[in-house]
Amino acid sequence: MRIDLHTHSTASDGTDAPSGVIEVAAQAGLEVVALTDHDTTSGWVEAAAAARRLGIAFVPGTEVSCRSGGVSVHVLSYLQDPAHPALLAFTDRTRAERITRARRIVELLGPDYPLSWDDVLEQTADDTTVGRPHIADALVARGHVADRSAAFEELLHPGGRYYVPHYAPDVVEAVRAIREAGGVPVFAHPGADGRGRVVGDEVIGAMARAGLAGLEIDHRDHDDAARARLRVLARDLGLFATGSSDYHGRGKANVIGENLTSPEVLAQIEAEGRMPVVRP
Ligand code: AMP
Ligand code: FE
Ligand code: FE
Ligand code: ZN
């Protein structure tokens, strides 16, 4: 069975509509796909309808922005109650403060790379979780850079002079909130050190004690050594392992279905989650 548990749509920083992500998944021969937009569940209804129409199973999820001290980390939540206040309190605040932060980045860029807030809004759908990728797209539209990757490498990376961080909840508190909301928490790309700092094993241990269920190990941002190390850690902490593409449409090179999760792990996620998997 082909199962991909990490994708993004125009509800956050992917370039396909939620229904488009499901269409691409079906075309790629996937039997199960999750939609995990940053800090939102707004794509779920459209994705579920498309999945029913196309005969593919759909796992509703969210990629929750978190931090551990000053390190930015992402935790996937699967099958949570989308209306539960514990998690919504975090994601609503993150979404609001992401806008303030994006406006500051646009202000900082302005003298060197003329850009307006409207330029950024033009790159977002209604109710999108705004992120640096939308600023990148606006910079491309203005002709300042060639593509999203160039925008990140040249202007938007965390070490750069235009970077501004945004609010995010502490990762251990976020894991607890995901469980309270009936979600199944999985640490997204825990060893992706190419894009910024990553947390140490002691933080993953604290997350495990707070209810973490799994580690996303098969991900393109992990080399073989990182995967081997994470497999040992997952076994020691009693966590399961997932594999996923982190598909963003045209926004990233990641190909849908390029990494997969086993049916046994999906069954465990379904057993622990409050919401059902949407099956055709
Ligand atoms: P933000 O959440 O606003 O801090 O932006 C981070 C998001 O940008 C990540 O979730 C990725 O999807 C995306 N991203 C990071 N690096 C790159 C890159 N080099 N090219 C395209 N997208 C990227
Ligand atoms: Fe993203
Ligand atoms: Fe992520
Ligand atoms: Zn992601």
Image: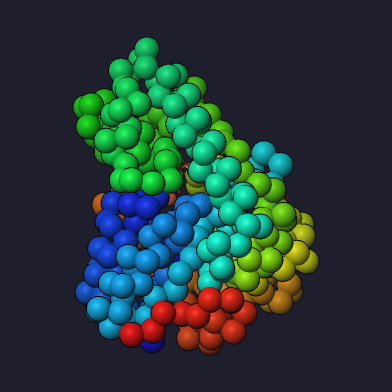
**Percent x, y of residue 59:** 44, 74
Q: Is residue 150 left or right of residue 76?
A: left
The colour scheme applied to this rendered structure is rainbow
The quadrant the C terminus occupies is: bottom left
Q: Is residue 270 visible?
A: yes
Choose top left, top right, bottom left or bottom right for residue 106: top left
Q: Quadrant of the N terminus?
A: bottom left
- Decide if residue 32 is on the left or right side of residue 73: left
Vertical placement of 95 versus 181: above or below? above
Q: Is residue 276 above or below residue 218?
A: below
Residue at 34% x, 56% y is 9
Residue drawn 33% across the image and 52% down it: 10
- Report ligand 1 position as a quadrant: top left
Q: Residue at x 60, y 69 (%)?
A: 183
- Residue 34, image x, y percentages: 42, 70
Position of 121 relative to 162 (above/below): below
Task: Tell which of 64 and 159 is nearer to you.
Answer: 64
Front-most of residues 170 and 273: 273
Who is closer to the viewer here, 232 or 206?
Answer: 206
Q: Is residue 201 visible?
A: no
Q: Is 93 left or right of 54, judged from the image as shown?
A: right
Give percent across and percent down for residue 15: 28, 51
Is 8 drawn above or below residue 54 in the view shown? above
